[in-house]
Amino acid sequence: MKIIPGAVFLLVLVLAATAVAQDNALTRSEVTAIRAKLVTVQQAMGEPAGYLKESEDFNLPTDFNPNASKAGKFWPITSSITMRYTDRAAAENTANAQKAAEEFQAKYAAAIAAGDYESVEQMMQEMQAIQAAAMAPTTPKEPLQVYLQFNMNPSVGIDPEAIVLEQPGVIALRQKELNSDRGQVTVYMDPVALKSTGELAKFELRTDQDGVGNRTGLYHIVIQANGAVPDIESWIGDFNYAAMLGVIDAR
């Protein structure tokens, strides 16, 4: 079978692209180290009061990003965790009701088999009370959607009235929906760009124009939480910021 010149050229391009991709691949230990930093920051966040973590999803890099025009320099790579929190009381009530129903079925069957109808009547009354409590009207907390991101590069203007928290290396800003407690709070961490936030009207989370010397380096952290703003503000006030800033690499 003949191979036409165009096909040969295409094959060369494919092989070259594959070789480049393999050359830029991170090692397993490098990905593990990035994941460990994400987990460290996640643990330093703690859990929001009254909420239960419903899900989490890691987005980990597989390749580094060299600066093709500057030997030994790299562009920072991103990684993240997406988390969802739900009302703890509502989730626990549902779990408890399911457990009670399963226990009731077992006890009910045993009482019927033994002919113990007095116990059967008592159990029916207890189950009715449990069902009534489970059906009582409540106002569950709004779910929280949280994004923990490494090496994102936002450019942010600061509304002085939107500042929730600031300290060396850290600033948190709120955005609320009109006539509602819903909205988002975003925490920005960068010991260089946010070294002193007192008079900043805007900031950018950037590294040097030529790139950085560490191909897996972490230089800024952004945590965005969407949901009930008062609950989020209370939560971020308890973050362990020293632990979070401690995983950021020197430039």
Image (cartoon, grey):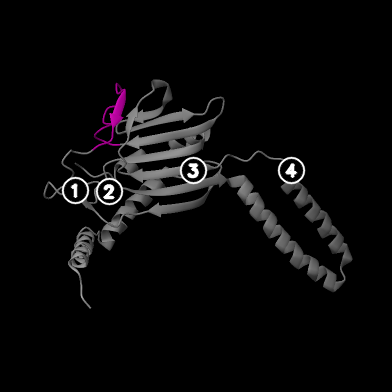
- Per the model, the C-alpha gap separating discs 1 and 4 is 58 Å
- Per the model, the C-alpha gap separating discs 1 and 3 is 31 Å
Question: Could you say whether the residue bearing mark 1 is in a helix, strand or loop?
Answer: strand
- Per the model, the C-alpha gap separating discs 3 and 4 is 27 Å
Where 244 sits versus 216, above or below?
A: above
Q: Please tell me which of labels 4 and 2 falls first in the chain.
A: 2
Q: Residue flagged by tag 1: what amino acid is it?
A: Phe
Residue sitting at x 45%, y 45%: 46
- The foreground one among 106 and 224 is 224
What residue does disc 3 label?
145
Where 184 sits versus 21, above or below?
A: above
What residue does disc 1 label?
74
Q: Residue flagged by tag 3: what amino acid is it?
A: Gln
Task: Tell me the mark number nearer the camera, choosing from 3 and 4.
Answer: 3
Q: Please tell me which of labels 3 and 4 falls first in the chain.
A: 4
Task: Tell me the mark number nearer the camera, choosing from 1 and 4.
Answer: 1
Q: Please tell me which of labels 1 and 3 falls first in the chain.
A: 1
Work out which residue is located at the far left of the displayed protein and give it.
71
Residues marked 1 and 3 touching at CB (< 8 Å): no
Q: Is residue 62 toward the left or the right of residue 240 in the image? A: left
Q: Residue flagged by tag 2: what amino acid is it?
A: Ile
What residue does disc 4 label?
136
Work out which residue is located at the far bottom of the displayed protein and give it.
1
Q: Quadrant of residue 115?
A: bottom right
Question: What crowding class fits label 1: few (fewer than 14 Cα within 10 Å), some (14-19), or many (20 or more)?
Answer: many
Residue 91 location, x and y as percent? Answer: 61, 50
Residue 240 location, x and y as percent? Answer: 38, 40
Question: Could you say whether the residue bearing mark 3 is in a helix, strand or loop?
Answer: strand
Residue 63 location, x and y as percent? Answer: 26, 56
Residues marked 2 and 1 touching at CB (< 8 Å): yes
> Which residues make up the magenta segment?
190-206
